[in-house]
Image (cartoon, coloured by chain):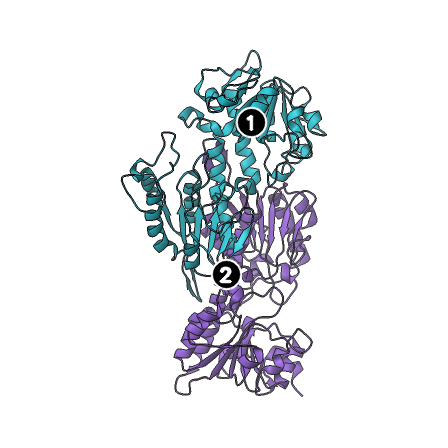
Chain colours: A cyan, B purple
């Protein structure tokens, strides 16, 4: 098995889908590994470290992909017209491609057409057995940490209560909206730093999780919100009425906050707006809002994806792209391990090759295409011709 | 008493010498207060907040200083040729000026000549009674906190050990050099964030303080280092031999660090070089060095004051100017309280004016000039003509 790792070329992408640690493991499984030169640089991994782990450092994507059986990517390969290189055309027929592909029907059809067996890691079912392969969870965790670190960096005061000879500085009020994986890590990090932390989430189960991390729960509760969790554990889209009631409770709370971290993502949809312009205006000068959902449209009315907005009343809104990519060493490390775990789980030791049983729940969840056909139920309408 | 607060005009200065909190207290003492428009903006304090506290918002420095009896500054007022405004010329004869004046003999002579009673807050004696007025201490504390926050921001991984489904990410190794007020706060903050923290200091007393904060002590000890503390509690300049031995111990340790925070300042001198170019080169790509002493020449061979240097081996060296100024809301708040405390300590309630007894240890330590003469022993050579 020849395994290829490319440099990521999409904007704001700093991660890499394999690390020297996982390269060593793949070689241990009997693979040869080609890593494109410079692939790890934005994650702090020089080519020499890949070489030391046993990888061949390939000069360009064509050389890396030559004869590849498995291709590891963070984001979908560039197709014709999407950038400097048509990566898709360079992937050999029959290769297995794994990454956060964010495919639509058209892209799925293109993978089928190209004879690429494409696995979209973000579609992994949320079952216990798959947890260690879950890129959404591993990346959200780091996004939550990073959000608080950057909030602390943008804030002109401190998080902890500081008792000094000159007097006491009070702790920062930190409000985390959405207590999924990212939100819970944001709560934990803000608590570590000494903030006075509160949080909200539409899912009733989140209330206990928030409290167990030592934060205060803030929120509106209704019959509807009691059903607000999908079987997979994600937040469900709720009615406009619910969001309006929730907004009232939040509006009163938010005016007293120094830091707000919004993390509400609804799978496959535009992120819900949780913080209105009026709420932003109610905040004190110097307050900081971090919108982890910026790339999905944002949870804050004034978020500009990829930018830091400073409002007229002196509130900073950080809407950076790709939050996990802003802590690329750690996020690459976990993403790479997620891919390694999926492959080792389905590794045929004798054949020294992955063996992906079509009936397996994980395989069914992830694989978009196999043997030139679209096989994923959600993309069936786009079956290859 | 009319009290004037100016906007700071020196480069990289974001702080302000009074806050709405201290303005209110001064008014309570019977003062009137004029604050130059925009003085608090860089610290997140709009003019309206000063007005609400009872201050008059003055359009420019001339208007603010008109008839002022007390002038509060962070840094020394601009003299002729130092900037857009000759602030010094606008300060009325007989006024009391307080700030971190960093005066030399020439500047002291100029204050005397101008008939300004100038108090240099950085010369405050380090005695128990003066602790609550100590700007060096209050600002160093925040610099130490800020150094770690910015290190975490520049670092491409996390500080805490993260145990995730995808595997464990180990904690960052953080090494704090110099365990004065800034260093101790850096240790505490890095520990809060979950780092694996070690520290060093030439003063033997620091060893116990380092350990009491849960960090590991690293260092070379000798007869000389056992005497390495001045009576005032500052670090003393030691011999070249001592620094060489210390450097050997540090060199071995530093190669294993992810984060290094250097805080070694020797009062009135260029900062000692603690981290050589070879030490920087021994560090892993992605490591971060924060040099709090950048403005005093730096503790790190490659520091460029005011810049972030990225070395060829991928180490980031943050040598920003004015570390406390990078957390301006908090640092202004404490600086302003330090000034307030000094004035209230020497306040004559009946006269509603400060009364600074020449024989008082604090007054003797701080006052450079009085009644047109240089009175401070360290600046006697520069007596006004």
The residue that mark 1 highlights is A106
The spot of residue A66 in percent (x, y) is: 69, 22
* Residue that appears at 44% across and 44% down: A186
The spot of residue A215 in percent (x, y) is: 35, 47
Q: Are marks 2 and 1 on the same chain?
A: yes
* Residue that appears at 48% across and 49% down: A290
Could you tell whether A70 is left or right of A214 in the image? Answer: right
Between A236 and A64, the one nearer to me in the picture? A236
The residue that mark 2 highlights is A312
Q: Is residue B380 visible?
A: no
Q: Is residue A307 visible?
A: yes
Q: Disc 2 or 1, which lies upstream in sequence?
A: 1
The spot of residue A206 in percent (x, y) is: 34, 40
Instruction: Say which of marks 2 and 1 sits in front.
Output: 1
From mark 2 to mark 1, how far is it between C-alphas? Answer: 43 Å
Circle 2 chain? A
| B121 w.r.t. B110: above or below | above
| A268 w.r.t. B59: above or below | above
Q: Say which quarter of the image contains residue A4.
A: top right
Could you tell whether A21 is left or right of B349 in the image? Answer: right
Q: Which quadrant, please, contains the C terminus of chain B?
A: bottom right
* Residue that appears at 50% across and 52% down: A317
Q: Secondary structure at mark 1?
A: helix
Circle 1 chain? A
| B125 w.r.t. B151: above or below | below
Between A53 and A232, the one nearer to me in the picture? A232
The spot of residue B350 in percent (x, y) is: 39, 87
Q: Mark 2 and 1 residues: CB-CB less than 8 Å, in contact?
A: no
Q: Which mark is residue A349?
A: none
Could you tell whether A347 is left or right of A227 in the image? Answer: right
* Residue that appears at 43% across and 77% down: B26
């Amino acid at each position: 098995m020849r395994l290829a790792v490319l440099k990521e070329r999409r904007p704001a992408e700093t991660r890499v889908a394999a690390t020297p640690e996982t390269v060593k493991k793949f070689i241990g499984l009997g693979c040869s590994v080609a890593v494109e030169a410079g692939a790890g640089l934005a994650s702090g991994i020089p080519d020499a470290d890949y070489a030391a782990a046993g990888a061949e450092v390939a000069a360009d994507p064509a050389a890396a992909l030559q004869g590849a059986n498995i291709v590891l990517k963070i984001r979908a390969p560039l197709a014709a017209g999407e950038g400097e290189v048509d990566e898709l055309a360079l992937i050999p027929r029959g290769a297995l491609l794994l990454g956060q592909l964010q495919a639509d029907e058209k892209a799925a059809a293109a993978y089928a057409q190209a004879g690429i067996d494409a696995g979209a890691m973000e579609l992994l079912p949320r079952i216990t057995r798959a947890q260690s392969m879950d890129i959404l969870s591993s990346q959200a965790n780091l996004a939550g940490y990073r959000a608080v670190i950057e909030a602390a960096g943008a804030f002109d005061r401190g998080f902890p209560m500081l008792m000094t000879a000159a007097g006491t500085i009070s702790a920062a009020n930190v409000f985390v909206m959405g207590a999924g994986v990212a939100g819970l890590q944001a709560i934990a990090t803000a608590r570590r730093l000494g903030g006075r932390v509160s949080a909200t989430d539409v899912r009733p189960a989140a209330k206990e999780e928030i409290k167990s991390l030592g934060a205060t729960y803030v929120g509106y509760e209704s019959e509807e919100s009691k059903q607000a969790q999908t079987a997979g554990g994600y937040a469900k889209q709720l009615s406009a009425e619910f969001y309006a009631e929730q907004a009232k409770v939040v509006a009163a709370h938010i005016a007293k906050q120094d830091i707000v971290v919004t993390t509400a993502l609804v799978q496959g949809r535009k992120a819900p707006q949780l913080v209105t312009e009026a709420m932003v205006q109610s905040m004190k000068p110097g307050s900081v809002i971090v919108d982890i959902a910026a790339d999905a449209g944002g949870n804050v009315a004034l978020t500009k994806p990829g930018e830091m907005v400073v409002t007229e009343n002196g509130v900073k809104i950080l809407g950076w792209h790709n939050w996990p990519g802003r802590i690329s060493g750690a996020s690459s490390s976990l993403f790479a391990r997620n891919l390694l775990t999926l492959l080792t789980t389905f590794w045929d030791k004798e054949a020294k090759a992955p063996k992906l049983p079509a009936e397996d729940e994980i395989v069914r969840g992830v694989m978009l295409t196999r043997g030139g056909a679209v096989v994923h139920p959600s993309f069936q309408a786009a079956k290859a011709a």
